[in-house]
Amino acid sequence: MFKQIDYTMIVVSDMEKSVQFYRDKIGIPLKFQSPDWTEFATGATTLALHGGGTPKEYHDTGDQSKTAGACSIGFNVDDVDKTYEEMRAKGIRFVMPPTQREGEGIKLAVALDPDGLPISFAQLVAHGAGK
């Protein structure tokens, strides 16, 4: 039946701004771009942007990942501290700096895309390892 997720689609309010964010700041290779549909080369699963979204007003209510119906995307990285510094230097806004997640075996940082979608960067670490 289903073996994998083929597309992760993000509805965006400003296609050009979002393409610049994912291509130029995050560094994901662009497959193609149009005003209403853009795809990035992300391996077996395609990251796609769908244009025409209505901008939402962002309210900082704490942990946005706990909102029902919300979604986020994540990347595993070799060095989350280095990734955090590189992304901040490009102007990416983080809502959580690199943080050791107790009992989860990861060190995690969370940024926001132009429309407020959380993007996680996780470094796998040995359980019980210190910061």
Image: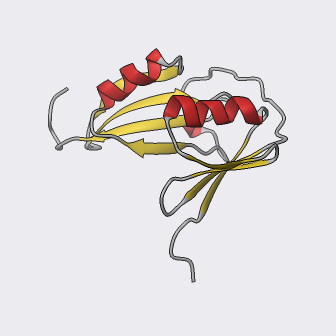
- Would residue 129 be found to the left or right of residue 118 on screen? left
Residue 54, how many percent across, how many down?
84, 35
**Of the pair 73 and 130, the residue shown nearer to us:** 73
Q: Quadrant of residue 104?
A: top left
Residue at the (49%, 36%) spot, across then down: 27
Residue 107, how many percent across, how many down?
30, 34
**Of the pair 43 and 76, the residue shown nearer to us:** 43
Q: Quadrant of the N terminus?
A: bottom right
Residue at the (56%, 43%) spot, across then down: 72
Residue 40, how many percent across, how many down?
59, 49
Q: Quadrant of residue 105?
A: top left
Residue 44, how many percent across, how many down?
49, 63
Residue at the (58%, 36%) spot, across then down: 22
**Of the pair 116 and 41, the residue shown nearer to us:** 41
- Residue 96 drawn above or below residue 118: above
Q: Quadrant of the C terminus?
A: top left
- Would residue 104 be found to the left or right of residue 47 on screen? left
Q: What's the image's color scheme? A: secondary structure
**Of the pair 26 and 129, the residue shown nearer to us:** 26
- Residue 18 drawn above or below residue 68: above
